[in-house]
Image: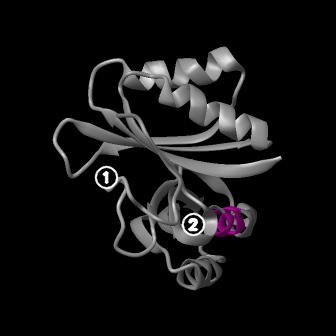
């Protein structure tokens, strides 16, 4: 089993997210993370999906997504040729005695304290999934009050873009 990231350009229309999620559900595929946002082009959104599976599962996901009418293009985002990041917001207890340790962790992980209260810190960390996992394990001992995390977002390295259908190092499955 291997984790893979797929970026999809879709029409920004009502129900598209539901149809993509339903496709995964119908086929018995699991989504590890899903991020959706508008793009630089009006009327088009970008979905970044992280999933885990074997080669057959990866190929089937791409094949099934390509059958959806609202999908414009699909691109695999290989880890070695892509910039893949997540965002973590975590609220940690501020007991006073661990203040310096918490601040050291924030600085080491290149994070920011975005809210401070006498009894808590809200910290923002951006990076690869493993970096966020490590920060969570470091701050657990201080007491995590709550946290939320985005799914992955990804861009290919260099000047190529997903909207350019000839990307060279990325496998793009063009619909039209």
Whether residue 9 sits left or right of residue 128 in the image: it is: left
Q: Earlier in the sequence, mark 1 or mark 2?
A: 2
Q: Which residue is mark 2?
A: 94
Q: Residue at 62% across / 79% down in the picture?
A: 105
Q: Position of residue 20 (x, y in %)?
A: 49, 25
| Magenta residues (range) | 130-136
Colour scheme of the rendered structure: one colour
Residue 172 vertical position relative to residue 42 in the rendered view, above or below: below
Residue 32 vertical position relative to residue 123 in the rendered view, above or below: above
Number of residues whose C-alpha sits closer than 10 Å to that of mark 2, classed few (under 14), some (14–19) or many (20 or more): some
Across the whole image, how many numbered discs are drawn on residues?
2
Q: Quadrant of residue 141?
A: bottom right
Q: Position of residue 165 (x, y in %)?
A: 36, 53
Q: Which residue is mark 1?
A: 163
Helix, strand or loop at label 1? It is loop
Residue 99 vertical position relative to residue 36 in the rendered view, above or below: below
Q: Residue at 62% across / 33% down in the picture?
A: 61
Q: Quadrant of residue 57?
A: top right
Q: Residue at 35% across / 34% down in the picture?
A: 176
Helix, strand or loop at label 2? It is loop
Alpha carbon of mark 1 to alpha carbon of mark 2: how far? 45 Å
Q: Which of the two residues, 15 or 137, is positioned nearer the viewer here?
A: 15
């Amino acid at each position: 089993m291997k984790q893979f990231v797929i970026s999809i350009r879709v029409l920004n229309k009502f129900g598209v997210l539901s149809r993509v999620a339903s496709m995964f559900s119908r086929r018995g595929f699991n989504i590890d993370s899903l991020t959706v946002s508008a793009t630089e082009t009006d009327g088009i959104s970008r979905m970044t999906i992280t999933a885990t599976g074997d080669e057959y599962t990866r190929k089937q996901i791409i094949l099934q997504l390509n059958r959806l009418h609202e999908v414009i293009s699909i691109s695999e985002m290989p880890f070695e040729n892509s910039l893949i990041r997540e965002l973590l917001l975590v609220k940690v207890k501020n007991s006073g005695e661990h203040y310096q340790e918490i601040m050291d962790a924030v600085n080491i992980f290149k994070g920011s304290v975005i809210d401070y209260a006498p009894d808590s810190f809200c910290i923002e960390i951006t990076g690869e999934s493993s970096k966020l996992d490590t920060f969570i394990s470091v701050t657990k001992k201080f007491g995590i009050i709550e946290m939320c995390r985005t799914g992955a977002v990804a861009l290919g390295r260099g000047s190529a873009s997903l909207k350019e259908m000839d990307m060279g190092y990325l496998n793009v499955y063009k619909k039209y």
